[in-house]
Image (spheres, grey):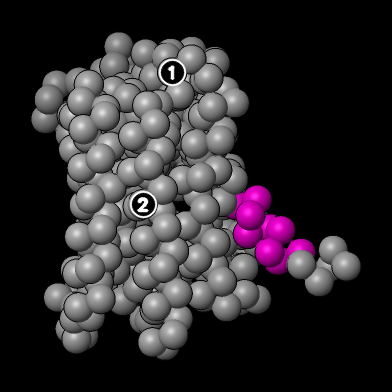
Amino acid sequence: MLSKYKYHLWLHLIILIWGFTGVIGKELGLLETTAVTIVFYRMLIGFISLFVVLRLLKHKIRITKKGIFATLGTGLIIAAHWITFFKAIQLSNISLALVFLSTTALFTSFIEPIILKRKYDFKESLMGITIIVGIAIIANTSSDYYLAMILALISALGAAFFSVINGKLVQEHDPKSITIFEMLGGFIGVAIFFTLTGELNTETLSIDWKQFGHLFILGSICTAFAFLVGVELSKHLPIFTMNITINLEPIYAVILGLLFYPQTEVMPPGFYLGATIILVTIFINALFKRKKT
């Protein structure tokens, strides 16, 4: 019986790992690790982990020169997405950051017609209005976290951009090769940022063993391992099944947040009302897309 659903179980494990990213980000924040430093090490460790694993698997990294520049550039967007995400967690909590990050689907619906030059679906406008209502309810009951909300929305916008761009890139290049260059591009981008701000020094990048342990898990398990398994699952599960299941990530993250940080993760009732409106709307939108397909 379990063998029949093994790929579904693996998918839920990966989503749980992604949800756990918020917990690690929160813990690193408590250890006074800045969001930029987190992303610097996450992308470096992610790049090294992917490179080592692909070499062990004797997987050839195949990508054109044009593809290299495109993926390195996309890595910068991913780095910005992660920096704003972790900063949002540090300024608020896991629940709020993940719920607002789920608005990626809304931003994607507006970006896809522009980049992929497809016809705009007006049902997605209705989805957008409904999600905005959910956001307004949360904002009204969580006024202490306005900056965190803005950063989380910027993070969602970044996620929408790189997911649409990757959708084009995977049609021409190997997904594993794309990701390894994106990790490298993001790492180089953050390193340049540190250089320009004069913070590329041992004081800024100094971490203790506890911080390194969290960052290693973040870069190797939550990034490299989760990606490789995700790519493999896409060969065995329908895209719709994966997309709609991935929408469970904010729910898993909220539960994990409550388990690990019950004192800071409990939110006013209005937050849960707004979050429910947002998440239900995203699920309904996924069902509409399946019907349209």
Q: Identify which amino acid the numbered label 2 is placed on.
A: Ile
Q: Mark 2 falls on what kind of element?
A: helix
The disc, 1 or 2, on the residue closer to the chain's N-terminal end is: 1
**The residue stretch that appears in magenta:** 6-14
Which residue is under mark 1? 264
Q: Residue 136's quadrant in the figure?
A: top left
Q: Position of residue 61 (x, y in %)?
A: 47, 67
| The one of 139 and 162 positioned closer to us in this rendering | 139
Calculate the distance from the C-alpha at mark 1 to the C-alpha at mark 2. Answer: 22 Å
Give the quarter of the figure containing the C terminus: bottom left
Residue 26 visible in the current orientation: yes
Residue 247 drawn at (x, y percent): 47, 57
Foreground pick, 103 / 172: 103
Q: Is residue 10 magenta?
A: yes
Q: Using the image, tell me which numbered label, if any, was put on residue 277.
A: 2
Q: Is residue 293 above or below residue 253?
A: below
Chief secondary structure of the magenta portion: helix
Identity of the residue drawn at 29% across and 16% down: 204
Q: Residue at x 48, y 15 (%)?
A: 263
Q: Quadrant of the N terminus?
A: bottom right
Image point 51% across, 75% down: which residue?
240
